[in-house]
Amino acid sequence: MTDIPDRPAIRTLIDVDPAKAQQVAVLRAQAASDPESFWLDQARRIEWATFPTTASNATFDGDVSIRWFEDGVLNASVSCLDRHLSTRGDEAALIWQADDTAVSRTLTFRDLHAEVCRLANALRSLGVKRGDRVAIHLPMVVEGIASMLACARIGAVHVVLFGGFSPEGIAERLIDSGAVTVITCDTSRRGAKRIQHKTSIDAALKQAGTICSVRNIIVVTVTGDTIPMTEGRDHRYDVLVPQQSPACEPEKMRAEDILFLLYTSGSTGKPKAMVHTTGGYMVWAACTTDWALSLKPQDVHWCTADIAWITGHTYVVYGPFATGATTVIYEGMLGWPQPGRWWEIIDRYQVACLYTAPTAIRALIREGDAVPERYSLASLRRLACAGEPISPDAWEWFYNVVGHQRCPVADMWWQTETGGGMLCLIPDAQPMKPGWATTPLPGLNAVLTTEKGETIPDGPAEGALCFTTSWPGQARTIWDDHKRFRETCFTFSPGKYFAGDGARRDENGYYMITGRMDDVINVSGHRIGTAEIEDAVATCHAISEAAAVGINHDLKGQGIVVFVVARSSKTAPSVALLSGIIADRVGRYAAPELIYIVSDIPKTRSGKIVRRVLRKIASGETENLGDLSSLADPAVVPALIKAVTEQN
Ligand code: ATP
Ligand code: MG
């Protein structure tokens, strides 16, 4: 391990509420002394047709088997909708803001319940049965959310696919998941552009040919653009759904019946479909929404994630609806048609909780502080972010400029595999520390291990992040590939769940994520996480984004290459300046071999930097760049190769 450079200290910033801190201490103590009763208590957060008598039945040894609340019976849509009808039936459940500023739609819990039931009946009328997979390929519209809950209602397994996937990406996932029905739309808007949904699905089905089991396509009208329809297979949502009954008996699901499959972001390789089951996932969504966001039924909550990602599943749909809060969804893009669009939405709907991703925060910073300063933002009470490490500088900006030093910032570390937040601040109960994902949530047992998988004793350390026990929201397996699940997550340190990320722990037990273990750079025996170098570069205000990778080096083992995006081409800092900042902040050993100033960095469709592609480009291996299907904009790659060649 390397000498640990100075990091920002814990800053209390917002007063800790002693009563809240005490409450959390009691929870943690109960979780440690009597986990079974702790988890059964947590299970009461959701509605059950039959309450479970046992909590955990999980082992990370041998073949790995994870089961929770096994004899419980429930339906996830009941916790999200039916249970609120008597208390909040006429209150807003879902607010949809269209791309067009003048267009929006508000559905009460009663409205949403009726829409979900109609769609559930429509799916049944097409022969969709319990356990069947239904792919959802929609932009951020009401029907996307209704589709997820309608599947849950009839016990079908939803598989939400990102709207922008290419036909190849869709075909691969339709075949892998064995979907029988697809819910899509004509086209969708992305700024001034149109995204082809229906024609992409048609092309995907053609490519997939006879191995694909899709029998029906339901087509939502989003833009009204003309699209081809195939008689007998394709059905208009507007025709099929309104004629159905607004009542639909929820299917009684066992806790371990599958609620959804979801493909990971594809940052490190070929995406895999994680399997999430009903009871445990719902309990964990409800727990973490309460602990990390402290959401209340009267709150307006806006999580900016697309429903195609786990953040969209847990913190747009299941967590907030289980709480009975009002959820905002926005069809459009950040900064479109004007840079203050997000802030305008917050003021318009009096959003109390804003949950977003570091990639969006970096883009907002780039617009300048004058933009958010034009808005009140006085309704905000809580801020949260997840998806990538947030640099302390971006954290401070979020806290100061957006939260007006009034809103706690929850930096939530988690994964598609974990179902819900794992390391996170519990607002008001703990002091904050900029750039640190804080502590494991109650009931979790996190450890750091060496590279060999040996547990490092408590106290300040750096290592691989693992969990020694299961939690209800944990993915049960990878769809159709239990072997891959076991090998990637449970063999690194036998008997533990290995997250694949590196972390540092301080003397207070706070954790910061240093980057992915696969991306750790080893320079002359110094192991350096990518986040350390990137955080250092982020302190240079002329830079809006940075990504560090390691390349082979004859003497040092590995050398560091950094790709940086300047805020403006006129103010691009010199390579010498950046090199100096890294040497000062991280250490002389971390001085990069090369720094490339580029106009864009490859990202996944969920907005994460894809370092594996950068590593290949930096090493000159541009012939075989690996799986690019998860990239948001594959055109970034040739532009990057050109920029690198020119600067060499
Ligand atoms: P794949 O598994 O296909 O490579 P992915 O890991 O990007 O893709 P997700 O499950 O969407 O897919 O992302 C989880 C990962 O995102 C985490 O393992 C971690 O690397 C990163 N991450 C998420 N939240 C945070 C956070 N708050 N701080 C640091 N890193 C985070
Ligand atoms: Mg991952």
Image (tube, rainbow, N blue to C red):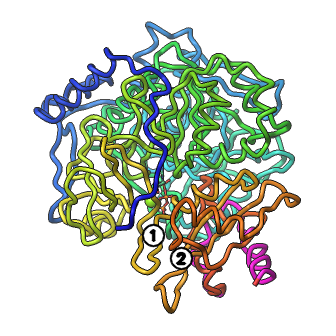
Q: 611 above or below 95?
A: below
- Left or right: residue 121 versus residue 286 is right
Q: 193 above or below 488?
A: above
Point out the stretch of residues depicted in magenta. 623-647
Q: At 46% from the left edge and 85% from the top edge, which residue is drawn?
A: 557
Give the percent coordinates (x, y) of residue 338: 85, 36
Q: Is residue 628 magenta?
A: yes
Asked if marks 2 and 1 touch (Cβ < 8 Å), the reply is yes
Secondary element at image label 2: strand
Whether the residue under disc 1 has CB within 8 Å of ligand 1? no
Residue 249 visible in image: no
Give the percent coordinates (x, y) of residue 75: 35, 30
Q: At 59% from the left edge and 70% from the top edge, which residue is drawn?
A: 209
Q: Quadrant of residue 379?
A: top right
Q: Nearer the viewer, residue 147 or 590?
A: 590
Residue 214 visible in image: yes
- Left or right: residue 96 versus residue 265 is right
Give the percent coordinates (x, y) of residue 569: 86, 60
| Residue tagged 1 | 520
- Give the mark nearer the N terminus: 2 vs 1: 1
Q: Amino acid at mark 1?
A: Val
Callout 2 environment at 10 Å: few (<14), some (14 to 19), or many (20+)?
Answer: many
Q: Is residue 454 magenta?
A: no
Task: Measure the alpha-carbon separation of dots 2 and 1.
Answer: 8 Å
